[in-house]
Each structure stands twice: as structure tokens, then as C-alpha cells.
Amino acid sequence: MQTALLAQPSQRVARLYFAGALLLFLGQIVFGVLLGLQYLAGDLFFPHIPFNIARMVHTNLLIVWLLMGFMGSAYFLVPEEAQVPLHSEKLAVALFWIFLIAGALTILGYLLVPYATLAAATGNDVLATMGREFLEQPLPTKLGIVAVALGFLFNISMTVLKGRKTAITLVLLMGLWGLALLFLFSFVNPSNLVRDKMYWWFVVHLWVEGVWELILGSLLAYLLIKTTGVDREVIDKWLYLIITFALITGILGTGHHFYFIGLPGYWQWIGSVFSALEPIPFFMMTLFAFSMVQRRKREHPNQAAVLWTVGCAVMGFLGAGLWGFIHTLSPVNYYTHGSQITAAHGHLAFYGAYVLVVIAMISYAWPLMKGRAAAPQRAQSMEMWSFWLMTIGMGVMVLALTGAGILQIWLQRIPTDGSAMGFMATQDQLRIFYWLRVGGGLGFLAGLLTYLTSFFVTDTTQAGPSTAGASA
């Protein structure tokens, strides 16, 4: 039976979401490489794909595919944790197609219609919500996102209410409901610029440095239970401790975005202190992952999933923790804000914390949905190669952007005697770093293509019956 290793047959609906997420992920990286090339040849594909449109596509695809990955992870995890079938498999399938089609039409709108025309045609004069970074979606798309989110949350919440309640599902629900509620601030676009930026950060910061960390923690806890066999009680204690620190530091750490946008000066103190503490929960996640792997009671056959899981904890700490810390203090941020150091932090943080946890969930769940405890060894070997190719490629990009940021600040922002370079003159001095970034991006793309290829690898040795991934 194809789903013999699944605790609930309805878990297989996650395959749709995982496949859609990976397809959009590939599109995101292709546009990322294009953006890197446009830094070096600004008129590349102009006027068909101008830089601002390519950037919107790149960042919007990132958000949509990660959300789709979170949804697929929840659809796989929740029925097993709750020990009951998904409330409505048909609703989950319908919402997937609505989400995918709406996302695809939005991207096509960006590419084929001038943005001002798109805004006028989609009711932005009725309720102005467009034009803000990450929240460029037209009003109908935003309304569609809310509708899909409500349907998804209804489906997941009803499943949890009917079945067993665990720490993992409760933390996951907190993160998912918080994600949906905070998105409502994207509909608030006041004319006062200070309030506008404040509400914007309520979405962007409190997503990636707040409720998304709850989702991350719950998915990591689930994966570690399944792949190590460590007692649930031990992992639950770690999970509660991590999310407590994540919420305290993440919510007050929003202040590091309030330094210089017109809010009271005390935010420079609050933002600096609590932002400096934000690496703690990510460091705890790293200790958590390594501690659970060392205590493991069994060797799980899916070693690729273990690698993605541990890699997520380590790279999340480096990207969100260490690279976030180096420019989060107010006196430092005065010089670094909006520089290429910000881009370095953003790339590594998203990759380490969220991209890797979604891939870890896919790596663990996909073989189970095909009736195997783990992918064939050749496929796992390709997955591990893809992990290192993507991680090294990301490392090259981040180090290049960090070097570019340091030189940018030195040439453009620190001189006070009138010798500071202008913006474009400074950019000319950074070209070597931008070439390195493109090289890292191509390496990352090669890693992603290797990962996608692993899904089509088979071998002649069929895995025997196993419950390694369906119990604990």
C-alpha cells in the first residue's frame, strides 16, 4: 500500500504543497541570479524585466513558496500528532490550487503589466495597499491570501480540536494564527510615513523574527522526535524554553527597526538590548538539535533528513543570530542600515532558518508518502551533495555581500571631511564582490537542481516494511 507508513492517509495532501513550493523556489532562485547579473549589467533584459520588477518577483516568490511549505508541513504533521484524519482533504486540495493560481497570476501581472497600471486596475485607489516592499501584492491577491489562510487555519484547527493536543501542534497553531493575524497590517497604509513604516514592520519583523520562529521551533521538534527517537517530554521542555526566548526577544527586538524612522529615542535602547539577545533562541536551537542527535535512541534510515535538520539549526544561528547581531546595535546600525550587510544577513537568515526547515520536512515526509521509510541511498547521497552545494553557494554570496557592505560603508558613509564617495561611484568599487555573489548564486542554483533531480532517482533495492517514520 502506497501510504502504509503514514499514520493518517490524509497526510498525502502535503505532496501537492511540497511540489508547488519547490517549483516556486526554483523560480525564486532563477530571478535571484538574474538580479545578481543586473547589478553588473543594469540594462540586462530591460525594458522587459526591469530591476524593480525582478526584485518584486524574487521576494514575492520567496514569501509564497515558504508559506506553501509551511502549509504542507502542517498538513503532514498535524494529523499524525493529533492522531485523527485531516478535517477536510478536499478543502486542502482546493485551497492549494486557489493559492497557486492566484500567486502565478500575480507574478504574471508584475511581469506583463506596468505596476502603476496594475495598481489602478486592481482597486488600489479604493484601498491603497500596494507599493511597499514584500507587500507589493494587488488588493485582490491580498484578499485571496486572507481567504486561503482562514480556510487553512480552519482545517488545521478543527483537526487539532478533534484529536490529541501536543506541545508541537499547539506551538505550531500559535505561529500559524499569529502569521495570519499580523498579515492584516498589510491592509493598513496610513499617510503618516512614520506610522506606515511602523505598521509595515509589524508584518515583516514580527513574521520572520516572531511567529515564524514558533513554526520553525515546532517543525524542528517534530523532525527531531521522528529521526532520533528521543523522548517527547525532553523535546517539549526545550521547545517551550526556545519559543519563550524567541517571543520576548523578537517582539521587543522590533525596536531595531524603529531607530531612525521618527519614533521616540528610547527605542534605540530597547531595540539594542533585546536585539542583542535575539541570537539566544537560535543558539538554543543549535544546542537543541545537536543534543537530541547525540541522545538518539535509533539510527534513522533517512540520514539526508537528519542533515537538513541539523543544518537548519546551525545555519539559522549563523544567519539570524550572528549576522543579525553584527549590525543590530543602534550606534552600528546608524552606518550599516540598508547597506549590503543587511542583504547578507537577510539571505543567510532566510536560508538557514526557514528554507532549510521546509526542505528538511520535505526530505523526511516525501519518502513516507511514497510508502518508504527513506529515499534510496543514491537519492540521499544526491540530497546531501545538494545541501553542501546550496550551503557553500549561500556562504559565498553572504561573504561577498558582507565584504561589499564593509567597503560600501567605509567609502560612502564613514568619511566626514567631504571625501565620501557618491552612491554610484561606490558601486563601481564593489563589482568584484558582485561577481562573487553571482558565482555563489550559480552554485546555489546547481545545488537546488541537484536536489530536485534526487526525486527522480531510483534503485533496485526496495526498502522493506518499516515503521521508523510513523511512530514515536
Image (spheres, helix red, strand yellow):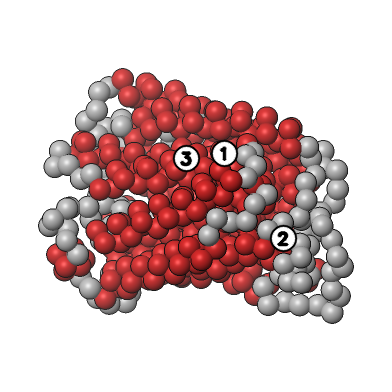
Contact (Cβ within 8 Å) of mark 2 with mark 3: no
User: Under tag 2, what secondary structure?
Assistant: loop
Labels 1 and 2: the sequence-earlier one: 2
What amino acid is at disc 2?
Leu
Mark 1 vs mark 2, CA separation in Å: 21 Å
Report the disc number at residue 6: 2
Nearer the observer, 29 or 35: 29
What residue lies at 17% left-to-right and 58% top-to-bottom?
124
What residue lies at 65% left-to-right and 42% top-to-bottom?
164
Labels 3 and 1: the sequence-earlier one: 1
What residue lies at 26% left-to-right and 51% top-to-bottom?
132
Residue at numbered disc 3 = 211
Q: In this view, does 316 lie to the left or right of 296?
A: left
| Residue 344 drawn above or below residue 333 | below
| Residue 202 drawn above or below residue 132 | above
Residue at numbered disc 1 = 170
| Nearer to us: label 2 or label 3 | 2
